[in-house]
Structure formats: C-alpha cells, structure tokens
Amino acid sequence: MGIFRARAPQPASVLLPRRRFVQGLALGGLAAGLGLPAFAAPAMAGRRVLGGTEFDLEIGALPVNFTGAARSAVVVNGQLPAPLLRWRQGDTVTLRVRNAFAERSSIHWHGMIVPADMDGVPGLSFMGIAPGESYTYRFTVNQAGTYWYHSHSRFQEQVGLYGPIVIEPRGGERFPAEREHVILLSEWTDTDPEHIYATLKKQGDYYNFGKPTALDFLRDVRGEGLSRALAERRMWNEMRMNPSDLADVSGHVYTYLMNGTTPTGNWTGLFAPGEKVRLRFINGSSMSFFDVRIPGLKMRVVAADGQDVEPVTIDEFRLGTAETLDVIVEPDADRAYTIFAQSMDRSGYACGTLAPREGLRAEVPALDPRPLLTMRDMMGEMDHGEGHGGHAAHAGHGAAGGQGDGVHHARAEFGPFVDMRVDTPRTNLDDPGIGLRDNGRRVLTYADLHSLTAPISASTGREIELHLTGHMERYVWSFNGQKFSDAEPLRLKHGEHVRITLVNDTMMTHPIHLHGMWSELEAPDGTFQVRKHTVVVQPAQKLSYRVSADALGRWAYHCHLLYHMEAGMFREVVVA
Amino acid sequence: MSAHMKFVPLTAALMFAFAASTQAQSQHAHHDDARVPSDAHTAHAHGAHGSHHGYGQPAAKPSAHADHAGMDHSAHAGMDHSGMDHAAAGHAAPAHADMQHGTAPAPDARPPADHVPPPPPTLDIGHLTHAQMDAVMGMNDNARFGRFMLDRLEYVEGGATAWSAQAWYGGDSNRVHFRSEGQRKDGTLEHADAELLWSHAIAPFWDSQLGIRRDFGEGPGRTWAAFGVQGLAPYWFELAATAYVGEQGRTALRVEADYELLLTQRLVLQPRFELNAYGKDDPARRIGSGLSDAEAGLRLRYEIRREFAPYVGVEWSSGFGRTADFARADGHDVTDVRWVAGVRVWF
C-alpha cells in the first residue's frame, strides 16, 4: 500500500546540530579537539582476541567517552566490545569469569548449546556472579560459527558487556574465504539505562521523534485530498496506535557503534583486492535493528545465527537484535567501501570501512527516509479486514470481532496490558520488513535462508502457541498478555519435539530468543527452513519453529529487546 | 572532569599507538582472527556422505550440500538415519513411538545436523521466589515508578497564577494518583482543589479512580469522595471524568479532555476543555446547581526537552446558570478570555 511511507521529516536534517553526539568522537579524537575514548589505555593491556581452551575473563567498570561526555561502561578485560573468543568445534573450553564490578553480573553464551548451569542466566542457570567472586564455565563446543556473549544481568549489556565468539568448524569452513572480519554492531548511550527504562515507563514514545505531524497531514491533504488523508489516519487514531513506532529507544540517546567504534572513528577492516572476505556480523545491541549494506558490493550470505545456509546473494539485510549473519564479499577494486548499518527507525547509523589500506574512506550514504508502518503491519492478512478494518485487529477493548482462523488469544490478552490483537496474522516469510520493502535493492528475507542440514526435529508433537503482546502507552511487554512475574514456566517433556507458533500481536518487531535449544524455523507450508537461535517476528506476523526439548534444565525464553525483556516479555522454559 | 581532561593527552598518545597496533594486529599479530586456517581449503573431500541415509531421493540440492562431508558426524556414527531423521540421535529421548507426530513431513534430504544435546546440569540452585529471582537476575517487571507533572504553571493575564499538576506512583496495575489545580491572585487563593486517588488499570487505555477531593480557596472548604475514570479515548483524546459525593448530599461532576496536535516533533498545540457541574447550590462558595462553569484553552508549547516546555496560550472560561448569577451579583465577569504564558514540566 505504501500510503504512509516517507511522510516523516528526513532525520539527517533533524540530526545535523547533534552531529557530534550522533556520530561520536573519532577513535583518534584529535580532530574533534576533545577527549578520547578512555578505554584506549586499558585496551592496550588486554588482548583483543583470545583463543585456546582456557580463558580468564574479568568483568569490571571502565571509563569511556564516546560523545564528549565521560561515562562508565561495564566491560570484560577492559575492552568494549569484550575480547573475541575463538574456539574450535569439539574442544572443551573452560572460562573463569571473575566479577570485579560492584554489582552482581553474569555472562551468557548466546546461541551456544551448553548445559543449563553453564548458560549464564542468574536465577535460572546459576546465582549469578557476586562482586569479587568467580564462576567457572566449562562445556564442550559442539557447534561452529559466529555467536556472541553478553551479560544477562539487568542493563549491563546496554553499557558494554558484550563480545563476539567465533568457532572454527572441525573440518574447516564450508565456504572458505581468504580473510575474515568480525563486525559487531551495538549502541552506546550516555544516559543511564535505568533512566531510559523509567522514562519509557512514564512516556512510551519519549524517544520517538518521527511521529506524524499536522504538517504532514496538511501535505497529504494537498497531495491526495482530505478524505483520503483522513481515511489513512482513521484506523491508527481509533486504535490509539502510532505508525511511527519503530524503535522504543532511538538515536536521540544512542550513538551506534561498529566494533565499539563510532561512525566518526571509522572502524576499518583491510582486504587485498580480489580476496574473498568473510564478514561475521553480530547485532550485539540492546534495542536496535540494523539494516546493513555495503554500497558497491554484493554480499553472499553463507551462515545465519552460526549455522551454514544455502548461499544467497543480496544487497542488504536486516539484522535483528542478537542475530548473527555471515556474508562473503569479494571486493576487487583498489578502493574503500562503506559498511553502512542504519537503525530501523533511521534515527542514526553505525558505519565503518572496508579498505585495501588504512586511512581510506568511501562515501557514507544518507539515511533512508523514515518509514511508517502500514495497515498490513497492524492487520496481517489484508483480505480479511479490507476496508473497515477493525475485524482483523482490535485495540484493546475495541470493536468486537471473531477470532481468525487458527489464532487463539489467551484470556490475559483481553486485560488492560495488551493494546492490540491480530486475528488474521500473515504467515509469509518473504517480507524484508518495514522500511526495506521495494527499496530497489535485493534485501534478504527469512524466505531466503535454508539450512544445509536436516532439522533436529524431523517432526513435531504438540504445538504451543504464544502471542507476543504488549502495551506501548503503559510500556508493559509480555507473552500471551502475561508478564514474566505473572506467568508459569513453559514445561517441555524431555525428548519431545514441539512446534512453537508465535503470533505478533504488536506493531513492533521482536527478536525472540530461546536458550538452550535451537529454534528450527518452518516455511509457511510447514517444511523446515532454517535453524536459528533468535527469530525475528514482524508486526502482525505468525510463524512457527520446531524445538527439540533435548536440553534438561531451566532456560530463559525472551524478547531480546532488553527493555521489553525487563518489562516482562520473558518466560522460563523447563525441560524435565 | 578535570582529572579526565588531564588524562586526555596521555590517552591520545596511547590511543594513536593502539589504533596503529590494531591494524598491525589484524594483519599478523592475531592473524588467527583475520586469516582463515589453510586447512579450510582442503576440507570437504570426503565425498557423498549425504547418500547413505537411504532417503531414496537424489541429491537435489546445490553443490554446497554435497560437499558437507567435512563435517564430523562422529556423534552419529553408525546411527541408522533411515526413515524419520531424528538427527539428535544421541540424546536420551523416550522411544520415538511415544511421540505424537502432529506433523509428518517428508523426510529431509539434507544431511543431519551436527547438533549434540547438552548434558544435564549439575548445579541445582533450588527454588527461588520471584523476589529472590528478581534480586539475582536484576529483573523486576513489577517495579514501581513515579512521575510528577506540572501540566500548567502559568501567568494569567490580569495578574493571576494558575496551576494544574498530576503525580502518580506505583506499578502497572495500581497507582497512587494525585491531582491538583487552582488559581491565586494578589496573594489569595481564589480557588483550588486537590485529589488523592487510587488508580487501577481496568482496560487497555483506562484506569478507574477512587479517592478523595478537597476544595480550598474562597469560602468554606469542601471534602468529596471521588469516583472516576481517566484514560485515552480513540483519536488520542486524554479524558478524565470524575463524579463526587460530598457532605450534606452535595454531588459534583468534572470532565476534562485534552488533545495534543503535533505541529512539529517539538512544537505542540494543545486544546483542552474542562466542565464542572454540581447537584445543589453552594452559595458560600458561589456555586450554583447544574452546569456551573466551563473552561477551554489553547496552548502552544515548545518541548526544549520532552520534560520542559514553555508555552503561550489563551484560556476562555465562563460561568453558567446560578453560578453566573452569583458572579454577576459579586460584580465579576461571567465570561473571561485571557492570555496565559507558562511552562510544562515533568520528571
């Protein structure tokens, strides 16, 4: 439909006066005439890459300065991001983690299949690591690929406790490359995350500076007539939904980082022209989706969430929070290329450079126009609710309507903490998502991802339907309308194979992460498609994945948007 | 800060060195990062691993599938992968016969995954209460928050000062809610009231409210029991409707509505409307029964920060019925239109 597209102001003009904040200080910092990231000094001390089977990691505070404001980060071995851990498939690794920080901490190995007591979730796996204490993680690495690790304690992940993991396959890489770089995307904020969270609780759209305005309305009236302009807005306004609700926390308080470096700092990865270069992208952010492209280069996707996939060549991909994606590029010219990762709400970007030598930069593209959600993002399958809407989706207690085929809303979804429900969700996986549709570039979708190996669960028994629910105004997030504190654990029988169906009853895109077990995404026809540890569910989308309940113990299952998780979008899964 | 600034030159030097060394590192010092081990090129030589599964399907997949053999399938060595492919074969699952096969897709032609289920945990932390879990995990989805907002703190043309404040504290379901509005002129409180309410979430956009209201200002003070709803109506109208029951059979009703029209992301035009009605005359407070007074305002604010927005506006107010009669008798204007200028602050 596209009727809401590109109405909001160009963020670039809005952000210009805030250039230094948005783009941060250069790593060299001298041009800005201000301080340097103070983490430079400690970083000298620690090694950036740790290999082998024995690891000593120390969690601690670190003074940093990304924007001209001195702040304190929580990091590993004095580094932000934490050191790259290189493991080998088949090895048993031992990681002694000492907590030198003032608060209880933890490290979770994201996407790693490890025993429950090695998973690093305080309160489920273990008791966390108290200040001054240590915990020894030991497990056998049976998988290969690109993963990451991060704190699972409060907001420590937001303030720097995350790092990459690369596991070398036992038999060598299936898709060999001559060189590789890890590219970890994240965000930094000078604002205390506790303050951000409290602010969201007080005003859910506080950080949204892309809302439709009266001037946009007047422009639409002039362009397409009053009745059309009103009609476009009618349903959003009736439902008290905001079509610009793309990111709860935006570039207003975020400076986006690539490998811990601001856009001005220009992280640079080297290549020799003609080489095949493997780029291991990791979204280690707390709240951001990144749309990544390298103008001038095609990217060949070879792995998703650490798992090899049928190669597919693309121009751009969206990386959900906590997802990883490996691509191979073949830059053959003796020139620089910009790796451009704009946030989904177009409020900022992380960027860096691929170059044949230091000091080169290529043009940094402008941010795309800020997209607005469409009716399809609210209603799912448009055929069912065409025209009068209201039947395909309701706001809270709004219009009564029958439940759609096969969608069951739990009773708690009809309570005060769920602001909408979708009765006719769409099931297609070939939608690149809001802001990437029909942009003229070949954008990766989940429909493009096919694992190279058979599913762990060849078939499934029972089906568990969970709805992603929430309330933007009250800033409450949940599964099936129940916050973590109100919900019983989800119990799986050891050895069973279940099919989990997620229905997104919100207007936001949620990356859902199940600990301990793979999420084997199915195509709409029920065939196995791709094995993932984090599954992004778009607004009004319904999708299913298989889970082999082969991991005994207590596991976390949650939205990987950190503030959604803290607000209740979290379940315990018990396999017994 | 100054200590930090002194630190800068040293840091700068170190940083420069570091930046250089990073490059060096990515070239050689940790070339295990940047360089793929050479044996990567020699893998995948073991041939058609995929064919021993007996799926009876040709290897229809692209070549990438055929050369998967570099993977070590030792975990599955000797397993019979024919028929249903429970690739996680090594795990201690109950007999497959027990499984209900809700879906029975065609066997997958792809080679099995190299997935190995994890061993069971050895650490048992026992049962934790939610409070203990919150403390250990640092996750509390029932935390209490509070907000204080001075909706309006304004100078009114003619020399009066008026305010409207709202504050709440509590969790998602239940909050203590405080509201107050009033006007002062020449050192006297003309009229004011304060309400203390228990606010409870009853519907997605609505809270019920129950509590007390106290009226101050000229005339005797009045105390009321208050019942109402406050929330967000379709089309984004903020609405509060409250009924009051006071001493000596007094009753009252107040309805307030406002709307925020975004001219830009920070420039907001806010129309508001308030209406008061009373069940019986209260001559001591110069209030008549029936619809007593109404206010309508239009304020244009600029959000320097979300929390701090100066504004200018105009406020129309009028008395009706017996209330208007009281005003006329006292020599006051029944209807007033005044400029206002003020600030909206919250934290």
Image: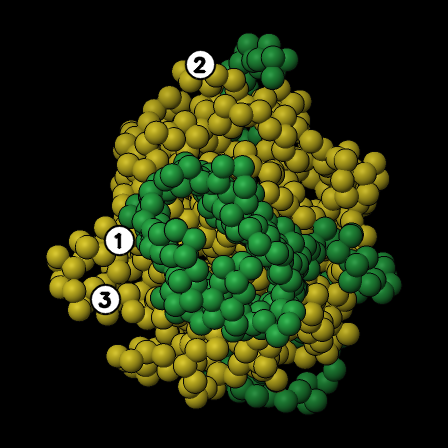
Chain colours: A yellow, B green
Residue farthest along the front direction in this orientation:
B329
The image quadrant that residue A333 belongs to is top left
* Residue on which disc 2 sits: A33
Tell me the crowding category of disc 1: few under 14, some 14 to 19, or many 20 or more residues within 10 angstroms, Cα based: some
- With respect to residue B272, does B281 lie above or below? below
Kind of residue at badge 3: Leu
Q: Nearer the viewer, residue A544 or A397?
A: A397
Asked if marks 3 and 2 touch (Cβ < 8 Å), the reply is: no
Question: Could you give the CA–CA distance between mark 3 and mark 2, rounded to whole angstroms?
Answer: 50 Å
* Residue on which disc 3 sits: A230
Residue B115 position within the rendered picture, expressed as x and y whole percent measured from the top left:
63, 64
The image quadrant that residue A550 belongs to is bottom right
Kind of residue at badge 2: Gly
Kind of residue at badge 1: Ala
- The quarter of the rendered structure image containing the C terminus of chain B is top right
Q: Secondary structure at mark 2?
A: loop
Chain under disc 3: A
From this viewpoint, is residue B302 visible?
no
Question: Could you give the CA–CA distance between mark 2 and mark 1, rounded to whole angstroms?
Answer: 41 Å
Residue positioned 34% across, 24% down in the render: A360
Task: Specify the label residue A214 is tagged with.
Answer: 1
Q: Nearer the viewer, residue A571 or B19?
A: A571
Are the residues under marks 2 and 1 on the same chain?
yes
- With respect to residue A216, does A78 lie above or below? above
In the rendered structure, the answer to whether residue A476 lies left or right of residue B314 reads right
Chain under disc 2: A
The image quadrant that residue B212 belongs to is bottom right
Q: Nearer the viewer, residue A372 or B230?
A: B230
The earlier-in-sequence mark between 2 and 1 is 2
